[in-house]
Amino acid sequence: MKRLSGPVILFFLAGIATVLADAEGVITFRNIGSEGWQVTDVQGRGVSASGVGLVRIGLEVGKRYHFDLSSVDSDLFAMEIRDRSGRVLFSQKDDDPPQGWEEAAPVITDEGITFTLTEELAGRIGTYRAASYPAMVGFLRGIDSGAVERARQEARDEPGEDHSGEGPDESGETPG
């Protein structure tokens, strides 16, 4: 094994810190043998994770995310992010950067995968899985928070419904 010198290690650690500082949401993974992924930590806004084994992760469109795989042996359990039809979008196994996703600005290292969830990417992402262990799979979905808020506003503004008694009046008091 090649021994790294002090300045090289500091440069490498500074690069990881830059990637993490750039991310608005961080999802930390560990592997459960070759059986599945476990999300051990979720930090930041616009990200949610639920489930055990087949973890479902929701990501807000327009934000930058880091999938932290620093505690995973990426040589053995290289993660891939795939589209809904199963095609690889990003992979820790590829030495070449992914083509066609420049707007997502992916950064792929042994320590993780970092990308911006663009609207186009949100419409395509489907799963994350270990390249060599297909049973190690989880699900991804893009969430357009603007669309959710617009739908809520449209529901409140539908004609024929009286919403006048639902909130505070000019004095700040709620009628009732």
Image (spheres, rainbow, N blue to C red):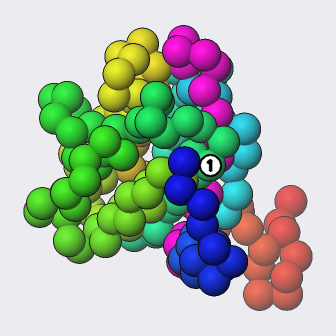
Give the residue displayed 50% in from the left and 61% down from the top: 65
Count of numbered badges drawn on the protein: 1
20, 47: nearer the viewer: 20
Residue 33 location, x and y as percent? Answer: 60, 16
The amino acid on which the numbered mark 1 sits, given as a three-letter code, is: Ser
Residue 39 falls in image quadrant: top right
Identify whether 107 is placed above or below 151.
below
Give the residue displayed 55% in from the left and 36% down from the top: 73
Q: State yes or no: residue 61 in magenta.
A: no
Q: State yes or no: residue 32 in magenta.
A: yes
- Residue at disc 1, secondary structure: loop
Q: Residue furthest front?
A: 2
Identify whether 143 is placed above or below 63.
above
95, 7: nearer the viewer: 7
Is there any visible trace of residue 82 in the rendered image? yes
Relative side of 109 to 126, left or right: right
Residue 85 location, x and y as percent? Answer: 16, 29
Residue 167 falls in image quadrant: bottom right
Give the residue displayed 78% in from the left and 74% down from the top: 168
The residue wearing badge 1 is 70
Relative side of 144 to 44, left or right: left
Residue 124 location, x and y as percent? Answer: 22, 45
Q: Mark 1 packing: few (<14 Cα in 10 Å), some, or many (20+)?
A: some
Residue 139 falls in image quadrant: top left
Region in magenta: 17-36
Quadrant of image for the C terminus: bottom right
Give the residue displayed 29% in from the left and 68% down from the top: 104
Is there any visible trace of residue 120 in the rendered image? no
Residue 24 location, x and y as percent? Answer: 58, 70
